[in-house]
Image (cartoon, grey):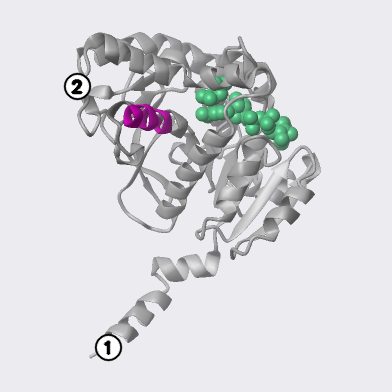
Amino acid sequence: MLSLKLMKYVSAVSPFSPLKWNLRRGIKVAVVGAAGGIGQPLSLMLKLNPLVTELSLYDKVDTKGIAADLSHICTSSTVRSYFGKKELIDALECASIVVVAAGLPSKPGMDRSELLDANASVASIVAKAVSNACPSALLAFITNPVNTIVPIVAEVLKQEDAYDPKRLFGVTTLDVVRAKTFIGELLDIDPHTVSIPVIGGHAGKTILPLLSQCDPKLELDSEEKAQLVSRIQDAGTEVVRAKAGKGSATLSMAYAAAHFVNSLLRAVNHEENIIECAYVQSDLSEAEFFASPVLLGPKGIEKNLDLPEMDDEEEKRFGDMIAQLNKEIEDGVKLVAC
Ligand SMILES: NC(=O)c1ccc[n+]([C@@H]2O[C@H](COP(=O)([O-])OP(=O)(O)OC[C@H]3O[C@@H](n4cnc5c(N)ncnc54)[C@H](O)[C@@H]3O)[C@@H](O)[C@H]2O)c1
Ligand SMILES: O=C(O)C[C@H](O)C(=O)O
C-alpha cells in the first residue's frame, strides 16, 4: 500500500493534478494601467500574492521604475515592465488574468458616464490586444463607466471572434467592500464577518445592495435602510469630493481588485466554491449585463447563480434600475457599431 507521503507525491506530480498543472504553467497576471492611482497599489498587492508567478506591468507611460521597485520585494513572482503601444501585445502574451485599471478617473461634479468618451478607446485597444495575445485569459475591467465599458469590450471581442462571456468581468467588488464596511460600522462588528450581495451595476441607482439578505440580519426601518443604500450608492462620489479634483478611489479600489483577482486566481487554481459578485453577461434580468453572485472556476464563470431573494423595496429598486442599465449598455453597443 502507498504511504500517505508517497500518495501526496503521486497526486502532486500526476498530469491531471491542479498542483502539477500550476507548477508547470505558472500564472501570469497582467495589470493594464499599472502606473496609475489604482494600478500601483494593486500591483503591490499582486506582488504579495503567492498565487502569482509573473506580474506584467503595462501602461502608456513608462513602468520601468515601478517594476524595478516591486521586483525587490522578496516574494517569488517575477515582475516585467512594458509601456507604449508597441509593447502591449508582449505585456499580455500568455497572461492567465488581465486586470484593466487604465483610463481617466472622475472629477468632482462628474458623472461616471462622462468618462465614456475618454475611456472607450482604451478599453477597445486592450480588448483587441487580448484577442491576439491571450484570448483565453480572464479579463477584469475596473475602468469606468463599468456599465458601458464591459458591453464595449464584449462587442470588440465579438468582432475579433474572441468573445467568451464566461471570461469577461466588470469589477464591482468595491461596492461589496463598501457595503460590508458601512454595515460593520453600523453594527459595531468586524466588517469581514458581514456578508451582503450587491447587484445591478456600478453607477448610481444601478448599485443595489440587498440589505434584506445581509448576514448578520439588519434590523432597520425603511428610512434607515434608504439612507444606508444611498451611502453605498454615493460612496464613490464621497471619495471624489474628498480628493477635491485629485482623482477617485484608488487605495480602496486596489484592495477590492486585489481581492477579486485573488478569487480568480484561486478558481484558476481549481479551488472550489469561489463566489464573487461581478458585472457579467447575464439572463437574470432584462439587462444583458448585470452584476450578481457568480460561481468561479478555472475557465471563468462556472455558473451564474440565481438572483438572491429581495424584499418589496428591493424589488422596486431592481425594476427602477433596468432602464438606466439598458441605456448604458446600449450606449456601448452603439459606440462600437459606428
Ligand atoms: N470599478 C470601480 O469600482 C472603480 C473604482 C475606482 C476607479 N475606477 C476607474 O478606474 C480607472 C483608473 O482610475 P485611477 O484612479 O487609477 O486613474 P489614474 O489616472 O491614476 O491612472 C490611470 C492610468 O491609466 C493609464 N492609461 C491611460 N490610457 C492608457 C492606455 N491607452 N493604455 C495604458 N494605460 C493607459 C494612465 O497612464 C494612468 O497611469 C478610472 O476610469 C476610474 O474611474 C473604477
Ligand atoms: O466614483 C467614481 O468615479 C470612481 C469609482 O467608480 C468609485 O466607485 O469609487
Q: Is residue 70 left or right of residue 303?
A: right
Q: Which residues are magenta?
A: 176-185
Quarter of the image that includes the C terminus? top right
Indicate whether residue 111 is drawn in magenta.
no
Q: Residue at x 36, y 25 (%)?
A: 199
Q: Which of these two is toward me, 60 or 337?
A: 60
Specify whether residue 160 is in view.
yes
Q: Which of these two is toward me, 269 or 167?
A: 269
Number of the front mark, 2 or 1: 2
**Ligand 1 occupies quarter:** top right
Q: Residue at x 41, y 17 (%)?
A: 231
The type of residue carrying mark 2 is Glu
**Which numbered marker is on residue 3?**
1
Q: Residue furthest front?
A: 188
Secondary structure state at the residue bearing disc 1: loop
Image x and y of residue 336, in percent: 62, 21
Image x and y of residue 322, in percent: 38, 13
Secondary structure state at the residue bearing disc 2: loop
Q: Is mark 1 within 8 Å of ligand 1?
A: no
